[in-house]
Image: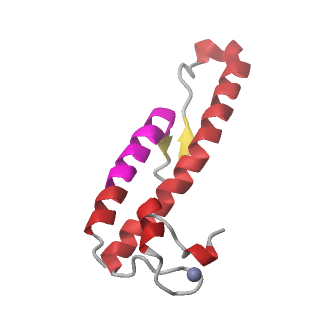
Amino acid sequence: MNTENFKKKLEEEKKVLLEELGTLGKKNPEDGEWEATVEGSTEADRNDLGDRFEDFEEKSSMINPLEKRLTDVTDALKKIQDGTYGICETSGEPIEEERLEANPAARTCIKHME
Ligand SMILES: [Zn+2]
């Protein structure tokens, strides 16, 4: 399979995901997890704690799906590098090309979609 086209799409998507995540939070260098950052979280804003908590919760709920998607995209890029791209993680069979067109980070074939 020619993976060049998928690789380009995945790299493009990774860039966008990292930009979006960067506006919501920052990556914890210790565990590699993304955490929401809240603006103005200085001592002076202490009485806004409720607001900030809400902001934090909202950003966290936006980060989660982006982070999950980033993992899928990063894993797919790794597979391209390893030469195992386009193989269903459940059955080990090749993933349909049309499925990869629709979602280049797909982990399974159409039959084993969640
Ligand atoms: Zn399968």
Q: Is 24 one of the magenta-colored residues? A: yes
Q: How is the image coloured?
A: secondary structure
| Picture quadrant of ligand 1 | bottom right
Residue 87 placed where, x, y %? 46, 81
Instruction: Locate residue 64 relative to residue 86 in the image: left or right.
Output: right
As drawn, which residue projects farthest toward the right? 50
Seen in the picture, residue 9 relative to 23 is either above or below; the reply is below
Name the image quarter holding the N terminus: bottom left
Q: Which residues are magenta?
A: 11-25
Name the image quarter holding the C terminus: bottom right
Please report the residue visible at 39 percent of the width from the left and 74 percent of the height from the top.
Answer: 79
Residue 24 placed where, x, y %? 51, 34
Residue 2 visible at all: yes
Q: Is 54 one of the magenta-colored residues? A: no
Residue 108 lies in quadrant: bottom right
Residue 32 visible at all: no
Please report the residue visible at 62 percent of the width from the left and 76 percent of the height from the top.
Answer: 112
Please report the residue visible at 34 percent of the width from the left and 73 percent of the height from the top.
Answer: 80
Seen in the picture, residue 26 relative to 111 is either above or below; the reply is above
Seen in the picture, residue 84 relative to 71 is either above or below; the reply is below
As drawn, which residue projects farthest toward the front? 98
Please report the residue visible at 26 percent of the width from the left and 68 percent of the height from the top.
Answer: 4
Q: Nearer the viewer, residue 6 or 59?
A: 6
Residue 90 placed where, x, y %? 59, 82
Residue 67 placed where, x, y %? 53, 51
Name the dominant secondary structure of the magenta segment.
helix
